[in-house]
Amino acid sequence: MPTEAPTRTQRTGLIPLLIVGSTVAALVAVGLLTITGADRPALIVVRVLTESAAVVTIGSLLLAAFLVPPQENGTLAADGYAALRTAGGAALVWTLGAVLSVPFTVADALGQPVTALLEPSVLFQVAGLMEQAKAWMVTAVVVALLALGCRLVLSWNWTAVLFFVSVFALVPVAVTGHSSGGGAHDVATDSLLYHLIAAALWVGGLIALLAHGRRGGDHLALATTRFSRMALVCWIVMAASGVVNAWVRLPLDQLLSSDYGLLVLGKTLALVVLGVVGYFQREKSVKQVVATGSGRSLLKLAGVEVLLMFLTIGLAAALSRTPPPVEGRVLPSTVELRIGYDLAGAPTLARLLFDWRFNLVFGTVFLALAALYAVGVWLLRKRGDAWPVGRTIAWIAGCLTVVFATSSGVGRYSAAMFSVHMEAHMLLSMLAPVLLVLGGPVTLAMRALPPAGKANPPGPREWLLALVHSPVAKALTNPFIALALFVGSFYGLYFSGLFDWALDYHWAHLAMNAHFILVGYTFYWPVIGIDPSPNRLPPLGRLGLLFASIPFHAFFGIVLMSSQTGIGDNFYRSLGLPWVTSQLEDQRLGGGIAWAAGEVPLIVVMVALLVQWARSDSREARRADRRADADGDADLVAYNAMLRKMSGKD
């Protein structure tokens, strides 16, 4: 239902609101840091400006991609295009803030004025040695490309891609801040990633929704309803991740006695107020928008919520500039500094099975995927539809395999020993993807999710269908590309020096694990996947693709077992683990694991492929029998007649 035409005040009131909100956030951050004795207010102003532009960019792309519908031909409607242009302008400001953050970060680390770093050669030479400065440079490049993309694209598909790129642009700075160093930096970094992404979606989405209402855009009720559901999830994620991050960084007895603890309490209080006030006002506003088609109540209340959000941004900026208290904390060991935690001893079978350290990223994501799958099966059975039990078992087992490989003792020791890392690698790239593709998640989603209908805006079912049929999915499931990525990643990662470099960074471990899972999934999907693949292969083609990968895996294991050069040798030696007497022997053990363990999943795949082949023949036979019953076996009669005719001629 179209909304009321906006007044001139409504159309022009958003920019002043953003200016006032950013100013309030900057003043709050500078004031709090002045009270605590910190300096460099200019850095705080730049940081607040950058974060404000980031949330506006992400929120505007969220609105254009998922909150308002595109046109029937797949191009953006007027509302989506307006949000896209807003995102492009905000991305330029974000780029400027990222560029300015490089010299300010370097000057802050060196304790010098920014004017001393105006020489580009000096600045880039010093910045190249600082992880935080390099992260800002990477962010500047990514966001500059994002701004360019916002000026060039018009289709919904590319707008969705730009949205995910904008979310990714938050990652480089997040994984190189305070949380990336010291003890328990794995948990601190993971929780901070959840916190920042949820905050950006919540704050940015509300600002974009407010801008949409002030423009008098269509589908305001739909956008408000979708955002309200997402906002509740974001608030829960922010609250949970904030508690985890503070628990890691702040001893409980210093919650009230340190500046860091007081800022945590202040931010927590602001989030609680925002969550409660925002939830009730959106529930009220949604009902009014749906009933009347007017967004006046939403605009009035959302403005107050946006100002409260900017206040929270100011508190967050001050918190990021305040180091956690160190009094009363035990100095972490070398092992804890390098990998984030200590190890109890040699990796016995009991420790590998039961010495767990829950991985916030993969553990949470795959437990959630298992729960969503179970909900989908329940919805099907609730309406009387059947779903094979074997598929459910396969999917749940695949999710639990990922959780086990990243959170059990295998995941705990994989960061410190090459042999255990190879165990996790085999589980994530060879076993878990096999089980996941046998679960048929896309087929289940297509049956469980209701279709939007031609007269309605596209919803989750249509978004998933667009992803499956996207050019990216078609390219990744191409047999030659899938095979090259699957087997080539083994050699490219371990024999190029990339693995040696990645060992020092927790975020690189996350990226490696994600790569193992995704590459394995895209390889096994066209081979044994239940879901229809964008590139369908005949049975012999599937079998040939599977056999083509076997020699590469075997040769990889043999190379590791016979190598005389240690992979990641400097990192592993720096840990000083007393039970690893020879790094080269541990590497050879890892090669043996890769050679032997890699064959077991291939046997499972072979059995699954043969079973699917047999079932396909059986289904074809049943279809032929039904066709014969329907037409009186016309094909057989015609064939016999042809034989009689040929016999008569002879």
Image (cartoon, grey):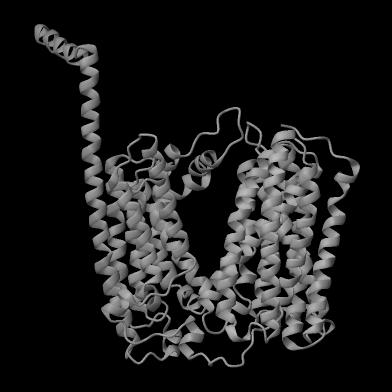
Residue 51, percent across and down?
73, 65
Lateral position of residue 509 relative to residue 128, left or right:
left
Foreground pick, 632 / 240: 240
Foreground pick, 471 / 136: 136
Say which residue appears at 74% left-offset and 76% top-offset: 318
Residue 558, percent across and down?
27, 72
Q: Residue furthest right?
A: 8
Residue 648, percent across and down?
9, 6
Depicted 349 relative to depicted 74: above or below: below
How many marks on residues? 0
Lateral position of residue 4 relative to residue 632, left or right:
right
Foreground pick, 649 / 248: 248
Say which residue appears at 42% left-offset and 57% top-offset: 519
Say which residue appears at 31% left-offset and 39% top-offset: 538
Say which residue appears at 64% left-offset and 82% top-offset: 255
Lateral position of residue 149 relative to residue 216, left or right:
left
Specify the quadrant that holds the N terminus: top right
* Quarter location, residue 563: bottom left
Depicted 213 relative to depicted 627: above or below: below
Specify the quadrant that holds the C terminus: top left
Lateral position of residue 326 relative to residue 49, left or right:
left
Depicted 342 relative to depicted 186: above or below: below
* Quarter location, residue 164: bottom right
* Quarter location, residue 233: bottom right
Foreground pick, 453 / 637: 453
Task: Decide if residue 220 is in sight here.
Answer: no
Depicted 41 relative to depicted 603: above or below: below
Task: Decide if residue 491 is in sight here.
Answer: yes
